[in-house]
Image (cartoon, helix red, strand yellow):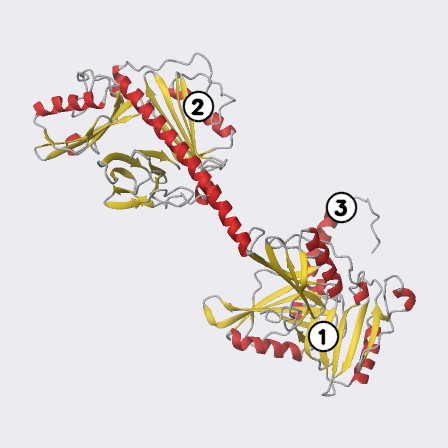
Amino acid sequence: MPMIPRGTQVPARWRLLVCGLFLMSSCSIAAAADGGIADVHALPQLEGAVEDTSRPDPYRVEYRVPTPAAVTLPAVRKLLSADGWVPYVMPLEETSGTLKFKKGRQGLSVHLTQARGRPDQSVVNYTTDRIYSNVPFPEGASDIVFDGTRPYLGCIAPAALDATSDFYTSQMNAIGWRKLTPEAAARWTNAGLDETVPNGVRAFYDHADDEAGGFYKQKPVMLTLTRRDDGRTNVDIRVAPFALPVDLKADSDIAGLPRPSFTRRAAGVGSASSNKREMTAAATAELPAVLAFYRRELAARGWQEDGNAPLPPGDDAAIRISTAEETGLLRLGRKYDFTMISLTAQVKESALAARARAKKEADDRFFSDATSVAKQMIAADEARRKVQAAALSDTPLNPLADSKTPVPLPENAEGVKFEGDDGQLEFSSTSSVKALTAFYRAALKPAGWKEQPSVINQPNMAMMEFSRSGKTISMTVMQMGPKVNVRAHGSGLMVAAAKPMAAAEVQAGSSEAKSSEPLKPDSESQLPVPTQRSSTSLATTKLPGSETPFRRELAASIPAPLGDVVAFYRSELSRLGWQEKADGAAVSTERAQIDFTSPQGPATLKLGRAKGETTVSLVQKNPDAATKADIMPRPGQARLMLGNIGPQEAALTINKQTVKIAAGAGGPQSPKGPMLDLPPGTYQYALRMPGRPARTETLTVAAGDAWGLVVGPSGDVLPLQMY
């Protein structure tokens, strides 16, 4: 067939023909084209084998047999040995479950597993292994340890020394190995070729590059044969010591300890900051080179040698080392052609004591700072509450005209949410707790509702229970910032086929004004908000010293129609990579709630209408930060974290559980205070401290929320939503 010159345009039909021929022949020709690759599909299989042909692979075959692994393993070894395959083990892999075989210059790995759900069956895998540095095995050799990448061979030949020497003289020559000449060895320093071996012989070989034979940049090898007392011969082939690296470079640390390059089986325990740490490795270098590396590296890191230590069995060197804070031990030994490394370091007792003192001082400073910050927060919160309470009106209230709720609404009710099917009512007001409770007592008593006594009747919170003709109404009136929130529920509020309404919007005439201009994003805000806003605030929650918040919340009031604000946030959040959840949006003319997935975690946008403006609540959570800090609630639950920066133990009762909170709990001295997981809902809790009257409050939690309740020095409780 004539050759096609490079660059010639090949007709499409020829390309198709070539591809088809390649596909048809690749599986059968691949192994034959490379003498170093075994044709695994031609290897013998055990009786009853069923081959898996679902994933054709020229270098791997898998079949199932009707015998358990304990029976299959010796059977496979016997089967392949009868076919001329010689079993061996890899250095340092004596306990490996993979069987290794060699036949000429071809290698084979055999792996066995139990068939899924069938302990009476086994699955056998044949995989080709390429041998890059081939050396001959004496016939009948035992205890074979081999690695075809360097190479390394250790075994016991059944013949005497002279016969084994004759075998290697002929067989090494047959596969291209040549006796190393002094002229060729001159390129290496200290390459002595005339070494004598007591009770044995030694020879050095090199091999030219041979792509067909699998040799490439092969280092010279050293063959050592020694006579055994039983008449057999020990065989050892390894890279000649003078061809190994002498000046070892540093590889990446393990457990904060140095290790040289050219290592295998490297492992470590601990880290640079641990009280005790250890590093082990096997270096493909001679022991003097490894020892020189450690003397250089350890000295550069401030370690000094403190003399030799007793030599454990198998070690050739053991050196004590130390720094001002640590003591250590370096042990080196030889196994196969490796230098085995063991380096341990232990912090001294005096250094441990100094570290403990430093940590205590740092914790004390942190606790002092945290206490000061908490006191400032509590004082600021108390001052804010007082200012806000002073702005609330005690003026007697009149009922709202044309109210459609089962109980009257005060004339200044805002954001009314009424769900008659569930008997739920909620609104806010600028009147005080005192004025609102007086309003409902005056309005419900003439209608036949009887009030049950309640112990909660404070300036900032009151709870009332009413009953009439077998029906009940429970009301909670609580100051929430600059307004008072009223929540009521019970059978006395249930109305068939009731629908949500917004009475305050009806009272205000509530026709939305059209935006005078498109909403523009404020580039300085951490979370999106239009520049056209009448108010805004951003709150974040995070641990002291951390830059990653668990939760961010933006609150704003925007003088624009709700539809315009929805469009603004959908556009801006999409630009930031937020994705709206499927079926996660509920939008009406009066309110909207849209759930998102942001790059940091889940987020929720809630919009409503109040005083002719659109109110915004945008909350973004970071579950990775919350999980790392161990504040993430269980699925479907809310988590409550309790802390106490006061000087006395406190007891908090919630959901019929009483938890004691020790002084300092939740601070640096005791970082993990008590935690509770609660179902979503509204809970009344009571706090008790020695010598102080009980304090009662109400907390509403939702699934996935994490709240902190911090007891202050004066017995106040500061609720903080953490996640």
Report how far apart the C-alphas of labels 1 and 3 lie in the structure.
Answer: 56 Å
| Labels 1 and 3 touching (C-beta < 8 A) | no
Q: In the visual, does 307 lie left or right of 122?
A: right
Q: Which residue is mark 2?
A: 567
* Depicted 471 relative to depicted 233: above or below: above
What amino acid is labelled 2 in the image? Ala
Q: Residues within 10 Å of mark 3 (few under 14, many from 20)?
A: few
Residue 223 or residue 489, whichever sits in front: 223
- Marks 3 and 2, the one that precedes in the sequence: 3
Which residue lies at the image location 33% right of the left edge and 33% below the top edge? 718
Q: Position of residue 282 (x, y in %)?
A: 67, 63
Report how far apart the C-alphas of labels 3 and 2 lie in the structure.
Answer: 56 Å
What amino acid is labelled 1 in the image? Gly
Q: Which residue is mark 3?
A: 11
- Which is closer to the viewer, label 2 or label 1? 1
Most extreme residue toward the right, as rendered?
183
Q: Which residue is mark 1?
A: 154
Which residue lies at the image location 44% right of the left edge and 43% below the top edge? 629
Q: Quadrant of residue 287?
A: bottom right
Residue 481 or residue 571, whichever sits in front: 481
